[in-house]
Structures are given as C-alpha cells and as structure tokens.
Image (tube, grey):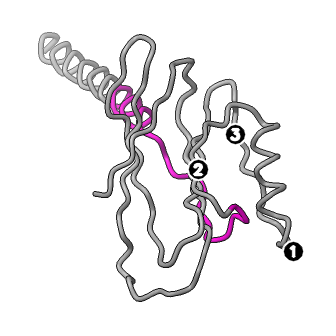
Amino acid sequence: MKIVILTLLFVCLSCKSQKKGVEHNEENVQMDEPTLVLKDNYSNIDSSQISVIKDQKALNKFFVQVNKTRKPGLPVPEIDFTKEMMILICAGEQKGSYVPRVTIVNEDAGNMIVNISKNQASDSTDTAMSTPFFLYKMPISEKLITFKKSDQ
C-alpha cells in the first residue's frame, strides 16, 4: 500500500515540475519577437521612417507630434523602459492600409537584424490618404539593430 501511494505521489509531483518548465520556455519564446502595442492611420509624419525608442522622453516626443491635431489625443502607452524598448514604424503618406510584420531574423553577440515585411490588407480599394504608424515592443537590448525591409 505504501508503495502505491509513494508512486502516485511521485508521478503527480513530477508532472507539475515538467509543466512549469514548459510554461517558462513558452514565455521566453513569446517575448523574443516584437509585439504590436499600438497602430493608427494618422501620425502627422509624411516621410517613411523606422526608429528605436529606448526612453520615455522620446516616446512622449513622438506622441506630441501625433496628438497635434487630435482632441482628445491618443494616450501614451505605459512601458517599463528598464525591461523593454519600442520599435516605431512610420509608413509615410500612402493609400490603403497594412500592418507590417516585424520579426528578428538574425541575432549574434553584438548585432540584431530585424525584418519588416509589408503584408497588404484585404481592402485594396481604399483610396484615402493616410500616414500610419505602428509601435512594437520587445525586450531591451544593447545590440546594434539593423532593419531590413521586404515586400512579402
């Protein structure tokens, strides 16, 4: 009887430890890729640009530009810049809409290559002019970030 109870106890305890290990690994994998935090069709920025935001002051400066013609303005997202940084993509003036897909392609000791691919939206008949922007967050890194654009 003691052997059966000890065996059941051992099985139950070992299953929980394996489950916690898997959950921890999945959490790390999800945080590696940039996550879309905010997107909007009007940024008041006419030229196409990509930048990395690593402090609250730079993020606030961007939102001052975005909110110049908005009443009420968009709220500034709350980001912990000790743990995360932002990738800002301003698409410039364009017709139609899309959401870029941002992925980390290659990463080594001092460099990180981030791919930005343009996925067209389903509504290709949209003729309104817009200046969309997209804010992505990702874990903070001191590596040199290089952006690579593709049209896929």
Q: Position of residue 93 (x, y in %)?
A: 59, 69
Query: Where 16 sits versus 124, above or below?
Result: above
- Amino acid type at circle 2 is Gln
- Residue 23: image tag: none
Q: Position of residue 69 (x, y in %)?
A: 84, 72
Q: Please tell me which of labels 1 and 2 falls first in the chain.
A: 2
Closer to us: mark 1 or mark 3?
Answer: 1
Q: Please tell me which of labels 1 and 3 falls first in the chain.
A: 1
Residue sitting at 38 percent across and 59 percent down? 118
Helix, strand or loop for disc 1? loop
Closer to us: mark 1 or mark 2?
Answer: 2
Query: Where 62 sits versus 19, above or below?
Result: below
Q: Position of residue 55 (x, y in %)?
A: 74, 32
Report the residue marked by disc 1. Answer: 71
Q: Quick one: 123 or 26, which is closer to the camera?
A: 123
Residue sitting at 59 percent across and 50 percent down? 49
Do labels 1 and 3 touch, CB within 8 Å? no
Report the residue marked by disc 3. Answer: 79
Report the residue marked by disc 2. Answer: 49
- Amino acid type at circle 1 is Lys
* Pointer 1 local density, CA inside 10 Å: few below 14, some 14–19, many at least 20: few
